[in-house]
Image (cartoon, rainbow, N blue to C red):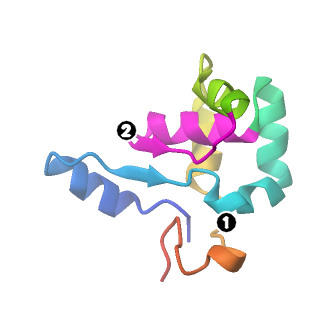
Amino acid sequence: MTNVPSDLIEYSQSKGMLVEAYSPVGHGELFKNQQLLAMAEQYGVSLPQLCIRYTLLLGLLSLPKTANPAHMANNADLDFVISDADMSTLNNMKRIENYGDASVFPVYRQD
């Protein structure tokens, strides 16, 4: 089970809808994922940059949350490409089971 609702995204996009990627860092839960942190480091970017770039490559409207101007500038610096192999890894990540206090607003598919 993955985190990305690919069928829903594909269906919505086929109907001409722009799908929103609300909280691309999973309400902060992705900061706990060592594999993602290592991947971001490999590209020389922050975890939010990796997550935002990923959602953009999926054709989604990424809406990261920050009130910090430095984070806003960093989030917008997306001049890197995620490899096909890493896209596959991101597409097939283990499903996040719990979003902590933000579980009432799940970011990714909840079955």
Q: Quadrant of residue 86?
A: top right
In front: 75, or 52? 75
Q: Is residue 70 above or below residue 16?
A: above
Mark 2 or mark 1, whichever is nearer to me: 2
In front: 57, or 67? 67
Residue 52, magenta (yes or no):
yes
Task: Decide if residue 61 is on the left or right side of residue 16.
Answer: right
- Residue for point 67% across, 66% down: 94
Amino acid type, mark 2: Gly
Alpha carbon distance from label 2 to label 1? 21 Å
Tell me which numbered mark, 2 or 1, is placed earlier along the sequence.
2
Residue 82 pos. (x, y %) = 61, 29
Residue 97 visible, this orientation: no
- Residue for point 39% across, 58% down: 6
Residue 11 pos. (x, y %) = 23, 57
Q: Quadrant of the N terminus?
A: bottom right
**Span shown in magenta:** 47-68
Q: Is residue 52 above or below residue 26?
A: above
Q: Which residue is mark 2?
A: 59
Residue 79, magenta (yes or no):
no
Assign a secondary structure to mark 2: loop
- Residue for point 77% across, 35% down: 40
Which circle marks residue 94 in the picture?
1
How many residues crowd around disc 2 within 10 Å: few (fewer than 14), some, or many (20 or more)?
some
Task: Decide if residue 108 is on the left or right side of residue 102.
Answer: left
